[in-house]
Image (tube, helix red, strand yellow):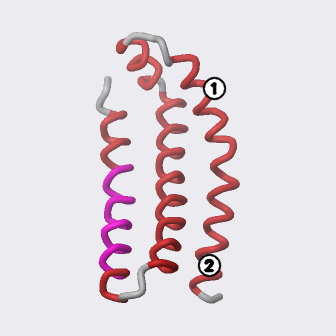
Amino acid sequence: MHSSTRKWVFTKISSLILIPFKIWFLINFVAIYDKDFFEVVDFFSSQLPRILFSIFVVISFIFSALTISEIFEDYLHIDKIKNVANKVLYFFAIVIPLLTILGIYNLS
């Protein structure tokens, strides 16, 4: 399979997987929106919300990295800049979810 085809397939699969996670997140976000800090920490102290939110963050960053990478492919015409931009993008697509997940697991 060609790499651009593989990217397209992964983008479509990750977007489909994100749908139920977005619904779950929006429902729970509305539920904890006007709560105080300790109630939000209490929500994320439960195991199921931690796991679901961690999966949501990872899949969201994979999806966003794939789509932003496609924008780089379309609009950056200098290969060196395109390669650096993609490497920086993928670095942050790994680091930011890891820091977010570590922060959530260190709340309690």
Residue 77 in which image quadrant: bottom left
Q: Position of residue 97 (x, y in %)?
A: 38, 49
Q: Quadrant of the N terminus?
A: bottom right
To which residue does mark 1 refer?
27
Check if residue 42 falls in the magenta segment. no
Q: Residue at x 47, y 63 (%)?
A: 65
Q: Secondary structure at mark 2?
A: helix
Q: Earlier in the sequence, mark 1 or mark 2?
A: 2
Look at the picture and state if 30 lies above or below 65: above
Type of residue at label 1?
Answer: Ile
Say if 82 sits above or below 21 in the image. Answer: below
| Residue 1 placement, left or right of 38 | right
- Is disc 1 placed on a helix, strand or loop? helix
Q: State the extent of the magenta-drawn residues as a range.
A: 83-97
Nearest the camera: 24 or 34? 34
Q: Which mark is residue 6?
A: 2
Q: Residue at x 47, y 33 (%)?
A: 50
